[in-house]
Image: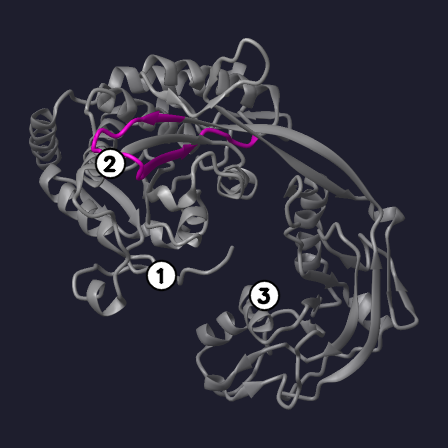
Amino acid sequence: MSIRIGLAAGALATLHLCGQDPDPARLRKDVYALADPAMEGRATGTAGQRKAAAYLAQRFLDAGLVPLVSQEGPPCAPSFLLPYTLLRSRQDAAASTFQLGHTMLKVGEDILTARAQAATGEVVFVGYGIHAPELKWDDAAGLEPKGCWLAMWEGAPESPGTGASKDWATAGQAETKLEWARKAGAAGCLFIQTRPDTEAGFGRMRLYLSRSVERGQLSLKGGAVRESQTFWLSAEAAKALRIELKADPKPGGSRALGTFVYTPKITKEEIPASNLAGLIPGTDLKLKDEIIVLSAHHDHVGMEGGKLHPGADDNASGTAAILEVARLLKDSKPKRSILVLSLSGEEIGLWGSQAFVAAPPVELSRIKADINLDMVGRNALDEVCVTPAQVDGAVGTLTQEARAIALRQGLKLTTEADQYWYRSDHFTFARRGIPAIFFFGGMHADYHQPSDTPDKINYEKLARVVGLAKELVLNVANATEPPKLLPKETWSTWTWPSPTSPALKPR
C-alpha cells in the first residue's frame, strides 16, 4: 500500500507540471449522473440513452467544446449530436421455413439461427470440419469449399490419437472452424449437435440464439447487413438427414447433402440513435486540420430481466474521463485539433463508431489517431490495461508514447486488454488504418450486471487514467509527426508479453 501511495504522489506531481490536475469529485459527479436510475441503463435508442446524450451535450458546452454541425431549420443552432438510424430485423421462427433436400426442418427447434435474411446454397458434410495439418487431420481433403455451406459436427473427436488435448480443443471451437471456412471461401457453416442423449449444448445455444432473435439483427439504415453465417442443427435433425456420428471417425469423407433454402419471416423497425462530438480547435496553421480523436461510449445494456443495469464502470467511467480531459485541455491551444467523441451503440455491435466512419462529419483522412477509454474505474490503483501490445498490424508509436508517459506517472501498463482488441470502438478506427489505442481498467465480476454501481468506482484511479489520457492526447496533438504503425520487427524488440496476440482483422 505504501508503494502505491508513493507512486500516486509522484504521478500527481508530474501532472501538476502539465497544468490543472484531474478532479476526482467532478469525475464522481459525472459517473453518478450517468449511472442514475433516471438514465434507465442508457441502452441505445431508448429514452434513457437520449437523457444521457442531453446531459453530455450540456457537459460538452460547459467544457467549451465547439460543435461540428448545426441543427436544421431556422434559426440554425449549434448541436453536438450526430444522429444515425439503426434498422432492427426480427425473425418470426414459427413462420420461417428451412428445407434441406427433401427434408423440412422446424426453425427454432430442429435448426437454430439468428440470421434475418434469406439464404440458399449447396451443403457439403465435412465430418468435424477440422482443417489442422499440424494434427494430421483434414476433413476437407480433396474438397473445394468455395461457395458451399459446410455441415459439420460440433467440437472435436473424443479420441483423435495424435496431438495435445488443448490443440484439439482449439481446433474444435466453432470460431476456429468458421475462420478456416471464411478463408477457404465457404458461404457459411451448419454445426450439428453431437450428443443426442442431452440437450446441454444445443439447449444453451437455443437460449443464446433466442435472445439474439429477440433482440433482432441490427444494421445501419442504408448500409450493408452484417448477417450470421451459422446454423445449428439438432441431433434429431441429423437423424432426419441420415447423418450418423461414428465412434471412430476418420478425417475426410465429405459428401453432398443437397441444396438448402432458408426463408425467414422478418419484421423491421427503425431505431433512432446519436453520437456526440465536440472539437478543441487546433492552432497551428499547418496542423490544425489534422484531428486526434478521444473516444468513449456512453451507452450500456439498459434493463435486462426486469433489472436495471446502471453501467457505472461500463462505461460511465470512460465517458466521465473524456469529459474531464476536455475540461483540462480546453485552454491548451493544441497544434492539431482534438475531437471529443461520445459514442452510442457500442454494446450492441460498435454501431455508433461504425455510423461515424460510414458518414463522418470530417474527412477520415484528417483523423490521425483514436485514443479510446472503456471501463477504466476499477481494480488496482496503479495499473491500467492497454491494447495494442502485440496486435499484429496495429502496434505503433501510440503504444510507445503511452508507455513512456505511464512510466513517468508511476503507472504500470498491463496487456490484459489485448484479448479485448475487437470489442470496443477503437477497433472501428483501426480497421480503417487509423492508429488507435485502448485503455481499460480490467475485467471484474460486476461486468454487465446490475451490481456495476457508481459506489464501486475508484475515483482516484479514474483521475490517474485521466492524467494518462490527457498527456497522451496533448503530446500526440503537438507532435511534429502524427502517430504511425510500426513493423513487427520493430515493435517486437520493445513490447511486453501478452496473454493473447490477435491480428488486426474484420469483426
Q: Quadrant of residue 87?
A: top right
The mark lying in front, picked from 2 and 1, is 2
Label 2 vs label 3, nearer the camera: 2
Q: Position of residue 325 (x, y in %)?
A: 27, 26
The answer to if 298 sits in the magenta stretch is yes
Q: CA distance from mark 2 to mark 1?
A: 27 Å
* Image quadrant where one finds the N terminus: top left
Please give the residue where the numbered disc 1 appears in the rendered image: 500
**Image spot of residue 138 (x, y percent):** 58, 85
Element at badge 2?
helix
Determine the secondary structure under disc 1: loop
Please give the name of the residue rendered at 49% of the width and 13% of the height, measured from the top-left corner: 77
Where is mark 2, residue-wise?
473
Residue designated by label 3: 174
User: Does residue 296 show up magenta in the picture?
Assistant: yes
Colour scheme in use: one colour
Mark nearer the N terminus (2 vs 1):
2
- Where is residue 297 shown, x and y percent of the image? 44, 33
Up/down of 350 relative to 24, above or below: below
Who's the residue at 34% across and 49% down the image?
A: 417
Between 158 and 407, which is closer to the camera in this rendering? Answer: 407
N-terminal label among 1 and 3: 3
Above or below 120: residue 294: above
Query: In the rendered structure, which segment of residues is drawn in magenta?
Result: 278-303
Which residue ends up furthest to the top in the rendered image?
Answer: 75
